[in-house]
Image: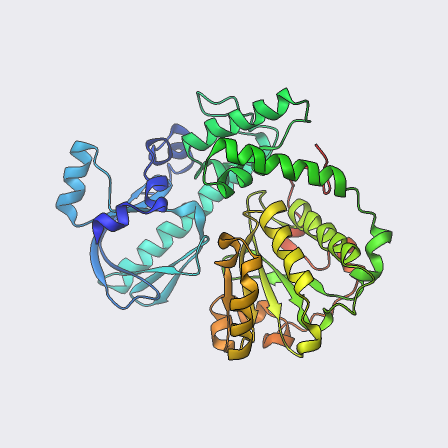
Amino acid sequence: MRAHANKSPVQKRKFRDSVMKVDDATSVVLRFVPEMKGALSKKFSRHWTWQERWFVTQGAYLVYYDDEAAAAAAAMASAKPLAAIDIRHLVSVELEDPVTVRLVLSDTRNSYLLRAESNSLATEWASNLSKRREVLLAALKEAQVEGVRPRSGSSVNVKDATLTPKTLATITDDELMALSSIKQQFASENYKELDSALCLRFLRARKGVVPDAIEFLRQHLDWRRATFPIEYEDIKNELSKGKFVMRGLDRDGDVVIYIRGSELGPDTYSSLENHMNMVFYLLERVKAEVLKDPMDKFCIIYDRYDVDRAKSDNDWVKAIAAALGNQYPESMKRCLVYPSNRVFRYIWNVVKVFFDPVTAAKIVMIGKQEELFKYVEPSQLVKRVGGTDDYEYKTEHVDTKEMMSEEAKNITRVGPPPQTVY
């Protein structure tokens, strides 16, 4: 089991020496937060089995070993722990019960549960990790405003663009070098300077293969030149129908976008081109003005209430699939299709051939309301799908930012403006 865990991509990324190194800046901001170590039982929230491990706070990470002896041996030999949890990526740290601490992860719907021997010990761990997270995020926010220096060996300028401290905490050295190659290639072709987050999305979409990423990105840049600008007045009528609505956050803290199936269908738009221009207009606003970080993703809820056969539109499905797969890769975290009955699941098995495999794998069929609540809290869901939010869509909210969370309204953006052409 352990060998399998060490082979996962996440493990490799977490254990890079340049990431796990406790740098001077991290040591300084955490100087008043005591380090902790000790035995805790741990499990993922969806699993049944508890495992006892030896946990140690290590700068921005909570790492664990088989036992105390393994931790001591690792310290002497500079060996790697079984796993490392990046505290900066935790959504929250809370007491699940008197002896259990829940660590809610930002990149998965799962959570770590840590069980201590007593309430006082559980409270001490929860308090320490919560304070550690608070200090680290405050430092990241300050660094994001002031800029951060690129790593040695890379020509990528991260001070003025989109490689925020949050991204730099997880990016690999190979990816940094690949970004340099990609940006140099397009500079030689007289494109405007590309922002690093854009390049990173396309690089990851092509599994780090630089030539493939360059070709993939080139078609996107050509598409942007042919598509933008899209004027608000040209898509205002289509936008007013409320087919796409931004509202609320999922349990990971990511923006939720509703696609209202009852408002779709070939008879609801003057042309598919105009409809897709509205989609592109919205996606550009979401990425430039709503997402907290240029590398953040959004969650889609495809609302199937009151949807009948007359709403089926294969041309629309193909167009949406092409948009997400070819022009906005690594942007959608998942799409929750609710409610999904047996008939629709059969239909999905037919139409999913229009989606690239990576995007198709992110489509989740939800049959029961309780399943939807695993991804989004009821307070963050509109009443139409079983939540408690009584929000009513209005076209003008797109420009007044009424559809955003209060936190999102006040964030200083670091990416390029909507509809940028390079």
Which one is nearer the viewer's eye here, 181 or 251?
A: 181
Task: Say whether residue 209 is left or right of residue 347.
Answer: left
Which one is nearer the viewer's eye here, 266 or 90?
A: 266
Q: Identify which residue is drawn at 80% across, 64% down.
A: 269
Res 141 → quadrant: top right
Task: Say whether residue 31 is left or right of residue 257.
Answer: left
Task: Say whether residue 53 is left or right of residue 17.
Answer: left
Which one is nearer the viewer's eye here, 243 or 110?
A: 243
- Residue 297: x and y in percent read 56, 51
The number of numbered discs placed on residues in the rendered structure image is 0
Res 344 → quadrant: bottom right
Q: Identify which residue is drawn at 51% across, 35% down.
A: 212
Vertical placement of 390 versus 259: above or below?
below
Res 127 → quadrant: bottom left
- Residue 303: x and y in percent read 62, 71
Residue 358 visible? The answer is yes
Vertical placement of 308 versus 215: above or below?
below
Vertical placement of 24 versus 326: above or below?
above
| Quadrant holding the N terminus | bottom left
Residue 415 visible? The answer is no
| Quadrant holding the C terminus | top right
Residue extending farthest right:
233
**Tell me, what colour scheme is on the image?**
rainbow
- Residue 275: x and y in percent read 76, 58
